[in-house]
Amino acid sequence: MTTIVQSINYNEAPDTLQSEIAVMLHQVWPDACPMPGVTIPKAHEKELNARSFYLHIDGKLVSYAGVVRKTIKHDGQTFNIAGLSCVATDPEYHGQGLGLRTVADATQWIERQGDIDFGIFTCSPSLDSFYNRAGAWPVVTDVVLIGSRNEGALSSESLDVVVLMRLFSEKAEAYESILRHTTINLDFPDGQFL
Ligand SMILES: CC(C)(COP(=O)(O)OP(=O)(O)OC[C@H]1O[C@@H](n2cnc3c(N)ncnc32)[C@H](O)[C@@H]1OP(=O)(O)O)[C@@H](O)C(=O)NCCC(=O)NCCS
């Protein structure tokens, strides 16, 4: 049984791998993620420069975690941020520690980059301990995450989610006061969120 977490830049991943990722995401989120057909639905927008972490067992992709990256402006400062996205394990393989391993590797990769100021994303409240165990991600109750300032944009306040956030760089530590008790705007196109 091969259970090594592998990693690749999503934009450079071969079609076969992008297709396997899409099939698994469709299984987990059938309404939001279409099944690959003639075209392969993208798990991550190209401009988010995603890094993919994935596990194969018996030749099948069974667990996945994406890391997306973006530069944002917040309170007059520029920050390079990263967030976990499309974290999923094939339902037939739940409860075997695979999700913990993909998220742990993805988090360690973020830590190693050196140019990422902070990590931020949301999850359902029931998964807070999963992310805490996998990557020491704490829930921050004083930070609201919004997709954009547009009317109807997605927000951690209107969705049933908690915000997870870790500061990585010296810059982020130095500016911690403006990164707490605040609203952080991802400045995403409509409909996108983390
Ligand atoms: C979340 C998910 C990726 C976990 O994958 P997994 O491979 O089953 O996770 P693991 O086996 O590594 O889980 C380890 C621990 O996390 C916790 N956990 C896992 N899935 C959980 C869930 N859905 N809700 C609450 N806790 C969960 C369990 O407590 C488990 O601990 P245990 O071994 O002591 O029981 C998987 O449940 C999944 O694909 N869910 C649907 C998609 C989703 O919600 N993704 C997250 C988006 S933010």
Image: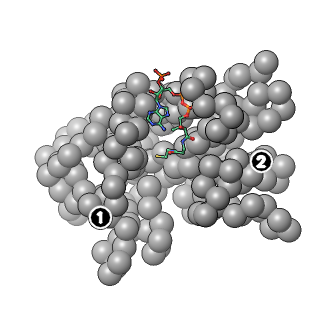
Looking at the figure, which quarter contains the C terminus? bottom left
Residue carrying label 1:
158
Q: Position of residue 135 (x, y in %)?
A: 42, 29
* Residue type at numbered disc 1: Ser
Question: Of marks 2 and 1, which one's residue comes earlier in the chain?
Answer: 2
**129 to the left or right of 94:** left
Q: Residues within 10 Å of mark 1 (few under 14, many from 20)?
A: few
In terms of depth relative to the viewer, which is nearer, 131 or 69?
131
Measured Cα–Cα span from mark 2 to mark 1:
32 Å
Q: Position of residue 37 (x, y in %)?
A: 83, 65
Kindly identify the residue that appears in the image at 34 percent across and 52 percent down. Answer: 161
Ligand 1 within 8 Å of disc 2? The answer is: no
Kindly identify the residue that appears in the image at 64 percent across and 38 percent down. Answer: 91
Instruction: Examine the image and state in which quarter residue 38 appears.
Output: bottom right
What secondary structure is marked by label 2?
Answer: helix
**Does residue 90 lie above or below 45 as drawn?**
above
Q: How many marks?
A: 2
What secondary structure is marked by label 1?
Answer: loop
**143 to the left or right of 126:** left
Q: Position of residue 160 (x, y in %)?
A: 33, 55
Residue carrying label 2:
20
Q: Residues within 10 Å of mark 2 (few under 14, many from 20)?
A: some
In terms of depth relative to the viewer, which is nearer, 91 or 135?
91
* Residue type at numbered disc 2: Glu
